Image: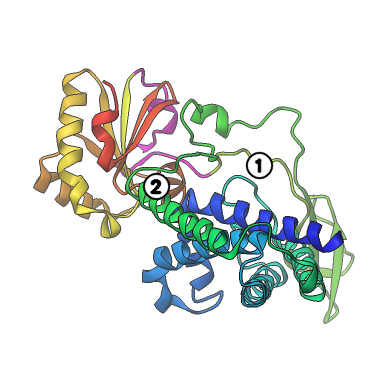
Amino acid sequence: MFTILSQLFVGGLFIFSGFIKLNDPVGFSFKLTDYFAEDVLNLEFLSPYALWIALFVVILEVILGVMILLSLYKKPVLWCLLGLIIFFTFLTFYSAYFNKVTDCGCFGDFWKLTPWESFTKDIILLFFIIILFLGINNIKSIFPKKINIGITVLSLLACILFGRHVLNHLPTFDFRPYKISANITEGMSVPPDAPRPVFEYIWTFDVNGEMKEIVTQSTEYPVVEGGTYVKVDSRVLREGYEPPIHDFSIESMEDGDLTEMMLQEEKLIMVVMYNLDKAKEAGFSKVKSFTDKAINAGYKVIGVSSSDPQNLKDLADLMQFNFDFYLSDETALKTIIRSNPGILKLEKGTIIDKAHYNDFDNIKL
């Protein structure tokens, strides 16, 4: 019985985890790029292939989950599951111990886990996979082998078609704080009764040639008799409340922070190009066509990007865009919409609609 429960748990969790990430493979590829960075795993040569690696990994997760539930090719499937979980356990431990990547992306934006929570989850999965190895003779198939193979092939085709759909449009299920109907201003606000972060301060003084440390939670300058101040360090004892949206802004080189003003607009179209070098040129002409219609319909249109202002100006001149670009954080823009370029329709900071560049015509003006 325990083996069967382990089979259901492992198979179900792999299918769920894989499907959640397959819903947003672009987001998972961003997470892989974080792991490939020079200061993490130093595998930057893999970054250009992050999206394809992401698709392969998430589809593999789903298919292995299906196969273990069907008891199809038990031994090779279990070895694959073991290899995957050992690899994931290494990644999550590395992230947790060295504090390199603060969110493993195991369940996408649906369920955020801290690095240590992710590591614990992987240890639990490893335990149940070992149980399956020990009880492999108790894992029985319900259906004949041909039916199991058919179900697996259909699952693979479904994964490929679903992945293709979300890549050419947007995630079917949006778990991010920028989903349709969300208000950006409200997402950035901090409730009055929200817990505040607690810091500890380590004051260092030179007392007759010896370094003396004073540890306190107060920001008041401590008095140390005969001591000369050297430095002060701080560390977080307890994290405070962090609003769902904490890194979004609209900046102008000339006028500074325009976030509040823009989010008060009654009819606003926001063109998002998080990185001009990685933007799809096929979307530029669609941006031009749609934004011209939006301006004629009485909308204020702006562009937001993290790219060099001169490059943005050159693109605007080339495409004859009738709107100005402003600066924003690249990570925030990647979170807002999984399309480069993409478009948001807002009313006083509330996201009314959003679209991939393949679907701009679906936004009603």
Check residue 93 in the rendering and tell me which mark sits there, or answer none: none
Along the line of sight, the residue nearer the viewer: 46 or 218: 46
Q: Nearer the observer, disc 1 or disc 2? A: 2
- Amino acid carrying mark 1 in the image: Glu
Q: Residue furthest right?
A: 225
Magenta range is 247-266
Q: Residue furthest bottom?
A: 209
Name the main secondary structure of what is drawn in magenta: loop
Q: Is residue 111 left or right of residue 49?
A: right
Quadrant position of residue 3: bottom right
Along the line of sight, the residue nearer the viewer: 54 or 317: 54
Q: Position of residue 124 (x, y in %)?
A: 79, 64
Is residue 213 visible in the rendered image? The answer is yes
Along the line of sight, the residue nearer the viewer: 361 or 200: 361
- Residue at image coords 32%, 25%: 268
- Residue at image coords 41%, 56%: 160
CA separation, marks 1 and 2? 29 Å
190 vs 98: above or below: above
Report the quarter where the N terminus lies: bottom right
Check residue 242 in the rendering and tell me which mark sits there, or answer none: 1
- Residue at image coords 26%, 34%: 360
Label 1 Cα neighbours within 10 Å, binned few <14 / some 14-19 / many ≥20 = some
Query: Can you identify the residue that label 2 sits on?
Result: 166
- Residue at image coords 46%, 46%: 335
Q: Position of residue 327 (x, y in %)?
A: 35, 45
Q: Position of residue 38 (x, y in %)?
A: 49, 76
Quadrant position of residue 148: bottom right
Asked if the magenta segment contains residue 255, the reply would be yes
Quadrant position of residue 55: bottom left
